[in-house]
Image (spheres, rainbow, N blue to C red):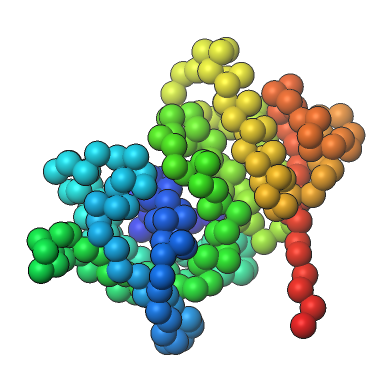
Amino acid sequence: MDYKLLKEKQHLITLLRLLAYVKKLKYTTKSLTSQFRRYRFPLRDFLNYNNLTPNYYQVKKLKTFFDLVKNNFVIESFSDKHYRMLVTIPEVSVHKSEQNILMVEIWIAEDLFDYLHPFLFSDVFQQKLTKHQFQVLFEIIKTYSSIHLRKEFNITQFLDNYPSVLSNQHKRQIQEYFIHYLKILHQEGKLQDKVLDLSSNKVLPITDLNSSHSQIAVFENIKVKFL
């Protein structure tokens, strides 16, 4: 999966945090080539939502993110043949209000909320992520975004390719993070009850997963609505 313009993984996490924050706000809609939502909110409120101190550094960092997204922020090839190209945020501005408050006005594609819904967990994104949690979450998002219902996770290979040297304790911790976040997806109804242990080729309940399972396949739970 190739994320165009997402030169740093942090930009994707910031986008997910943004969606998790604005989904509870009031908005107006407008139809262009697809449906878009218009939001207005104080920049400081979004920083507070992420438990960040609204100081000069954090404000500058967040404004840099908004500068990125307003330049035709495009996520390309979310999956193999689906969601080939989506203009997610066609317009965004950061300006001072009459009360001298930095305000954000942003248009976000309606479809993006449905597509990334599995990752809008308030208990995940309202806490400050450790380096290892960040890497694990990004890998899960990348794998889950495949069009295929079967999602394979080779945790052993992930650890072998990790960008830094890991102690055995950190390796176990990372394995536990994988299991923890997959179980959250299951609790949210996004994954089926059964998983496949690729090492033994045995099917087991997802609730029985533990850090000893390093090569597994989980299955997306599709909910079909009949009109």
Residue 184 showing in the rendered view: yes
Q: In this view, does 99 lie to the left or right of 217?
A: left
Residue 148, x across and y down, in percent: 72, 58
Residue 25, x across and y down, in percent: 41, 65
Rendered position, 90 above or below 3: below
Quarter of the figure that contains the N terminus: bottom right
Q: In which quarter of the image is residue 215?
A: top right
> In this orientation, which residue lies closer to the viewer: 15 or 225?
225
Q: Give the total number of marks visible in the rendering.
A: 0
Q: Residue at x 61, y 48 (%)?
A: 143
> In this orientation, which residue lies closer to the viewer: 153 or 97?
97
Rendered position, 120 above or below 134: below
Residue projecting furthest to the right: 202
Residue 74 showing in the rendered view: no
Q: Which residue is drawn at 79% across and 78% down?
A: 226
Q: Is residue 166 left or right of residue 6?
A: right
Q: Is residue 219 left or right of residue 60?
A: right
Residue 15, x across and y down, in percent: 41, 55
Rendered position, 163 above or below 89: above
Q: Which residue is drawn at 86% across and 29% down?
A: 200
Residue projecting furthest to the top: 168
Residue 181, x across and y down, in percent: 62, 38
Q: Which residue is drawn at 59% across and 44% down?
A: 140
Quarter of the figure that contains the C terminus: bottom right
